[in-house]
Image (spheres, helix red, strand yellow):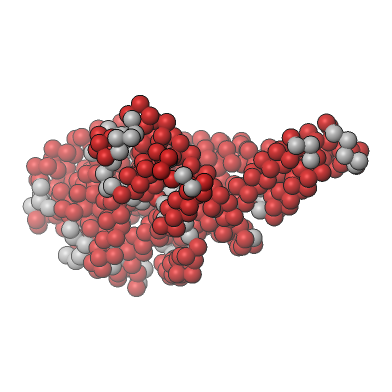
Amino acid sequence: MPSQQTDHLIQLIQSMTKAEKRSFRLFVNRDNKPNDKLFMQLFDYIDSTKTYKENDLLKKLPQIKKVQLSNIKANLMKQILANLRHLHKQDFSDVSIREMLDYAKILQSKGMTKASLDMLEKAKKIAEVNQETLLMYHILDEERKIETQYITGSSSIKAIEINDQSSKILSKVTVHNKLSNLSLMLYGMYLKYGYVKDKKDFEQVKDYFYSNLPDIKPHKLGFYERIYYYQSFVWYYHMTQDFVNYYKYSQKWVDSYRAFPQLIKEDPMLYFKGLHNALNALYMANKTEKFLTNYASYVEYEINFFDHMSESQLYQYKLFKYIHLLNKIFLTGDYDNGVKEVAEIAEILKSGKHHWDVNREMVFYYKLACVYFGADDFKTALDYLNKINNSPIGGLREDIQCFARILSLISHYELGNDFLVSYQIKSVYRFLIKMEDLQAVQKEILGFIRRTPLMTKKDLKAEFIKLRAKLLKFQNDPYERRPFLYLDIISWLDSKIENKRIQDTIKEKVIKPI
């Protein structure tokens, strides 16, 4: 089995574009001795083979000895990264700034103090334009070292200037640290637990949020501090299911970028995530018309900026595009057409080349299952649900894991698998209790499914009507409405009562909301 070092090297080479590979070869051959470079032969082997096999490599390249291989891999990784850094430094302001800091240090080591300070001044201007607060402090620290060690002719004036600037920057760095940590911790809580389940959950999240939120006005913050400030509110209102404020702060996040358009190019992924959350808030609030308008604008971004996006940026963009393609299907109820539209998502997930984390994969599997469920293809829905139910990863998106099991039961019920339903319902019950996720809505659904094998067809419709009436009472309850965010159980019940397809029921509601 390839080591982690080998995996990373293979992944890096596979991610390179043709232009990057061509540039790397020119970079390596700049001293006109290509035949002496064993790491280049390793590069050509990995680039040309579909499956990396170390024994095959050693046979094809006998000049590479097994004892050398680890060092050759490390050298190849270093050479590729050095070339990519040089090739893309203009795309990332922080990379250019760090390079200038390195140059300033080298100039200073050569006794060229004035040239070093000039280089730091250039770096400072780039940092100011691109809101690089942390790097700005680093630049000031380098200036301070020079001023304390060498007579520059402006020491007293410069000392006051550096003192004032560094105090302001350090204050910003402190706020930056608090807000970025708060945003990260809230996002981590959401990934683990999902939405708040009850008043106790809500109070815990609320106490944590407000006790860690700095008392500061957003208009006084730097760009990235403001983004982290808005992000924190986004995660808080998302977890607590306040979708009006979730949308409000997501839009503030997006508007902050639009006020500094040059930073969209600098950090498009964070901009995409803001757009994604704004769309998600509209979806959660069931604002179909506004969602469709914003989704169309998001799709246009790819048309206008496709050539300017790196591979990783493109995959991140497509991640959110696909999430909201699925959400569009749920809002409009067009499941038959939706099955055709999601084929590309299924292929990308199957290929494993998407660079998406396990959390994203789990969400996609659940949403794809919901699309096939809505199209009455319960077998395919179960295929995707089983990818979640059989996942060895615990402690991640426990909410999705719980609802995947409930939807599995309903799918088996639709397929007439009464034996499997009666067999699995106990294990689902135990799972939900273990996750401390057994709410009133879930109890009603599980109780209904448990009783169905004993019912006659004549009794079923009356039972569907009873269940619907019970669940409607919970639909607007702040702690019991969570299941309705994952599965439109009311539309499913309406379809059973009216003997219609679920997608026809949802389409009618889109035209004439209940």
Q: Residue at left 21%, top 47%? A: 408
Q: Nearer the viewer, residue 357 or 399?
A: 357
The picture places residue 190, in percent across and down from the top left corner, at 45, 42
Regarding residue 510, the answer to whether it shows in the image is yes
Which residue extends farthest top?
A: 67
The picture places residue 383, in percent across and down from the top left corner, at 19, 49
Regarding residue 236, the answer to whether it shows in the image is no
Q: Quadrant of residue 501?
A: bottom left
What is the total number of numbered labels drawn onto the structure image?
A: 0
Q: Nearer the viewer, residue 237 or 49?
A: 49
Q: Is residue 193 above or below residue 264?
A: above
Drawn side of residue 266 relative to residue 472, left or right: right
Drawn side of residue 505 relative to residue 25, left or right: left
Q: Is residue 426 above or below residue 479?
A: above
The picture places residue 401, in percent across and down from the top left corner, at 30, 41
Q: Residue at left 25%, top 53%? A: 369
Q: Quadrant of residue 435?
A: top left
The picture places residue 406, in percent across and down from the top left corner, at 25, 45
Q: Residue at left 41%, top 57%? A: 18
Which residue extends farthest bottom?
A: 511
Q: Residue at left 54%, top 47%? A: 85
Q: Nearer the viewer, residue 212 or 52?
A: 52
Q: Quadrant of the N terminus?
A: top left
Drawn side of residue 47 relative to residue 128, left or right: left
Drawn side of residue 117 relative to residue 467, left or right: right
Q: Quadrant of the C terminus?
A: bottom left
Q: Quadrant of residue 198?
A: top left
